[in-house]
Image: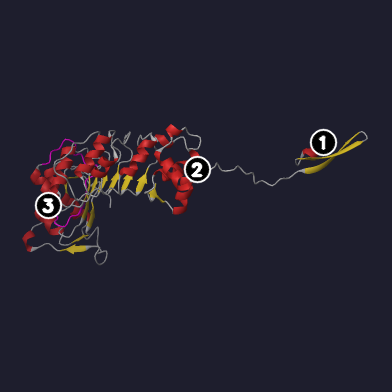
Amino acid sequence: MEPPEDREGRSFVEVINEKYSPENFPYRRGPGMGVVVVPTAGLQGSPMKDRLNLPSVLVLNNCGISKAGDQAEIAAFCAHVMELDLSHNNLQDWHEISKITSSIPNLEFLNLSSNPLAGTSLEPQCAEAFSRVRRLVLNNTQISWDTVMLLTQKIPVLEELFLCLNEYSSVSSSSVACPTLRLLHITDNSLHDWAEVCKFGSMFPSLDTLIMANNNLASIQDNKDIVARLFPNLRSINLNNSDLNRWEDIEKLNFFPKLEEVRLQGIPLLQAYTNAERRNLMIAQLPSVSHLNGSVVTDSEREDAERFFIRHYLDCPEKELPYRYHSLVTKYGKLEPLAEIDLRPRCRAQVKVHYEEKVEQTSAPPGAADQLT
């Protein structure tokens, strides 16, 4: 159904009434996928239809919503709703958003991406309306980091947080940690300094997955003890299209004690290598990583990569050899360069050369005999 052209000032209540009325959404989807809600006697005179087919997942993106509407009607019709997509609307008042979320008691997923929330303030009492949300998406909202911190403090069950495209170049640390957060997706920002990334470790001690592709991260600066203390549970990291340009930074990924999934595509360090060389060198540098750039690292691939790594550095001066080289030489020995073998079939023609009264026999490559005639 196409949304109306005049979207200014539309309420959440108006939109669900329009989108999920019997005329526009006439059939239940089946057991567990949709719920028919009948208004109670207390809602006599409500502008709602007598019956609405509301699924447990509401997608109301790009509907021009700027306000909540009657909270009693939201509560009556959305008590079963678990996921709500309000992206690309015109919500710019946290009070209106909190009126919606506080009226949906089972809400676990909320997407507010691309709503104009820059410069808006969130009061602590409003933040409590989000306390049941487990997955929160705030991409391209330009909300302040202080607002992010307030939300993480007021949502005791938050597990996944999406903060892409918010123009963060720095973040402030918080004295109150969010121990439940497992995934932080903060791509397409401007986080250049490793000190800013370290703050995520202290704020989110249970962090399992950190996705920060398309940032400007230039290096990993801490030692093994600090990295292990800040990120004791990090299992997966995505640093695609960062500015990493030293093998020392790649080696430091081994400081994360539980790291097993890494994405490192599009970094300056690897531009000079072929695709095969990039993968071999990365696998050899990261002995505990089981998935690289989305692909499983098999045992045979790891052995081939480690042998390639040794041979790659055979002619390197001793003082420039990476630490990993010595441990692999201990494992495999100092390997000789691979012999260059030409497996093309040898093919030469026997040619008789007649010159005056002399005849000489010789061999020549195919085609040469034709040139002599």
Name the secondary structure under disc 3.
helix
* Tag 1 and tag 2, C-beta contact below 8 Å: no
Residue 286 in view here: yes
Which is more foreground, mark 2 or mark 3?
2
Name the secondary structure under disc 2.
loop
Classed neighbour count for the residue bearing mark 2: other residues with Cα under 10 Å, few (<14), some (14–19), many (≥20): some
Q: Give the residue type that dot 1 points to.
A: Leu
The vertical placement of 76 against 207, above or below, is: below
Which residue reaches farthest bottom?
31
* Residue at 25%, 35% in the rendered image: 195
Pick the front one: 249 or 209 = 249
Pick the front one: 68 or 317 = 317
**Residue 372 bears which disc, if any?**
1
Q: Earlier in the sequence, mark 1 or mark 2?
A: 2
Name the secondary structure under disc 1.
helix
Q: Give the residue type that dot 2 points to.
A: Lys
Please state the horizontal and vertical placement of residue 46, each as a whole percent of the image: 10, 57
Q: How far is disc 1 from disc 2 in space, using C-alphas?
A: 51 Å
**Residue 102 bears which disc, if any?**
3
Classed neighbour count for the residue bearing mark 1: other residues with Cα under 10 Å, few (<14), some (14–19), many (≥20): few
Residue range (magenta): 102-122
Please state the horizontal and vertical placement of residue 162, each as a whole percent of the image: 25, 45
Pick the front one: 144 or 2 = 144
* Tag 2 and tag 3, C-beta contact below 8 Å: no
Q: Give the residue type that dot 3 points to.
A: Ser
* Tag 3 and tag 1, C-beta contact below 8 Å: no
Q: How far is disc 3 from disc 1 in space, using C-alphas?
A: 94 Å
Please state the horizontal and vertical placement of residue 325, each as a whole percent of the image: 43, 41
Classed neighbour count for the residue bearing mark 3: other residues with Cα under 10 Å, few (<14), some (14–19), many (≥20): many
Q: Quadrant of the C terminus?
A: top right
- The residue that mark 2 highlights is 334
* Residue at 56%, 43% in the rendered image: 338
